[in-house]
Amino acid sequence: MRRALLILLALSSLLPVEAAQADLAGSLTRQMSQAGSFSGAYVLNLTTGEREFAWRAGTPRILASNTKLFTSAAALARFGTDGTLATRVLGAGELDAEGIWRGSLYLRGGGDPTFGSRSFTSKFYGSGATVEDLAALIDEAGVERVTGRIFGDESSHDSLRGGPDSGYGVSIWVGPLSALSFNRGLATESGRSYQTSPPAFAAARLDAALEARGIRVRLKPRAGETPVGTTELAAVESPPMETLVRLTNKASDNFFAEILVKDLAMQARGVGTTSAGARLAAGFARRLGAPARLADGSGLSRANRASPRRVVRLLGAMSERDEFDAWYASLPVAGRDGTLRDRMRRGAARGRCRGKTGTLSNVSALSGYCTARSGELYAFSILMNSVYTPGARLLQDRMAQAIAAQR
């Protein structure tokens, strides 16, 4: 009798947990049943290791901007949270006793997406490497006049201006890509048009910054590669990689993501290309147990695909890495900032869920983390294809609310 009573008490103690799990699964099922047959979802309790929900979770779907999860994770792993990207000025020639640089100067880009004018970087990024800083350093080096010209060198990346979605030409959703981007490729700070030659444009801006300090450059600026045997005269560093990743993920910035994926290949192979960078990002994810097919850094290509289960594997694996705090902080917070500022502004998910959104025509995605009311951490991925995107977002938000409400 005593043994039977103990068993009954033990079983009764499990009922609230089982009921809560069933309630969560039921709520998520109701939402996913409205999403159509080309959608999938997966939810894992990272605290307990228990799978909470799976709905067509093994089928690869179009990722849209959830691709940026793979790009940013690989960038943090390769460069470290404190890693930076340098923009340098190198000289071919020599400085004489009168302060005359007898030769030309080469402005060599290092894949810094924030490089630009002081006013632009301050307004849009808070801080960053600027052409004015380089001009000041050249002035401090004692250069008073340059007999040659300023060359803009973008050879750290290939010269393709876009990704596969735009046939590698300039995309209106990205802007012109270059290892030597200045003000993200905009011809004016108001953003009315794009630069036709980013390296030549950046060289002209350095020329103007030097002239503003009284340093005259004899010949007109143009694009060109740095020759061997040059001397470094000045260098400025980008914000740390954790900041670049935050700027990428919070706003879902396609330009930053495409530059970063090229930076992966630049760091590993000497020259940055979209295809090589995407392979490196996919390789990193595969080593974490999260294979994916990646074609670019931003998710604009519909060739970027992974299953919800594998996206959650990436989320789970990243939660155990040293870069997790920086990666987690880069994700928009429900109801508060980034691309989730105007979603889930009320309810349990507000401030408790962080996620990467993704949108293309007929594609909507949301993947990330929720800290439930119980204090347990959940990872989730909801990938919806062939859907009406506003309606899909409502379903995703209800699912995140249900996860966050768990006690």
Image: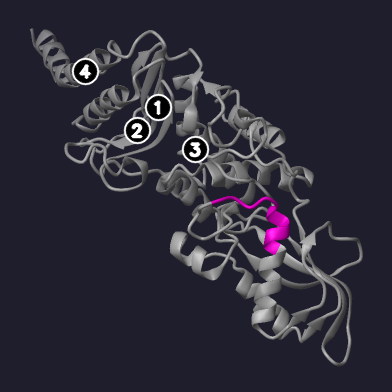
Number of labels in the image equals 4
* Sequence-wise first label, 2 or 1: 2
**Dot 3 lies on which element?**
helix
Q: Mark number for residue 47?
A: 2
Q: CA distance from mark 2 to mark 3?
A: 14 Å
Q: Give the labeled residue for mark 3.
A: 318
Question: For the residues carrying marks 2 and 1, which lies nearer the camera in this image?
Answer: 1
Boundaries of the magenta span:
193-202
What is the x, y in percent for residue 131? Answer: 63, 69
Q: CA distance from mark 1 to mark 4?
A: 18 Å
Q: Nearer the viewer, mark 2 or mark 3?
A: 3
Q: Nearer the viewer, residue 51 or 87?
A: 87
Dot 1 or dot 4: first in sequence order is: 4
From the viewer's perspective, tell me whether residue 366 is left or right of residue 266. left
Circle 3 packing at 10 Å, graded few (<14), some (14-19), many (20+), is some
User: What amino acid is found at the position of numbered circle 1 in the picture?
Assistant: Ala
Kindly identify the amino acid type of the residue bearing the numbered disc 4: Ser
Question: Is 290 positioned to the left or the right of 340 in the image?
Answer: right
Residues marked 1 and 3 touching at CB (< 8 Å):
no
> How far across and how far down the image is residue 379, in percent?
37, 30
Q: Residue at x 31, y 22 (%)?
A: 392
Question: CA separation, marks 4 and 3?
Answer: 27 Å
Q: Quadrant of residue 234?
A: bottom right
Of tags 4 and 3, which is closer to the observer? 4
Name which of mark 2 and mark 3 comes first in the sequence.
2
**Disc 1 target residue:** 365
Q: Which residue is mark 4?
A: 27
Percent position (x, y) of residue 89?
Answer: 75, 68
**N-terminal label among 2 and 4:** 4
Q: For the residues marked 2 and 4, what is the alpha-carbon distance in whole angstroms?
A: 21 Å
**Relative to 33, does residue 320 appear above or below in the rendering?**
below
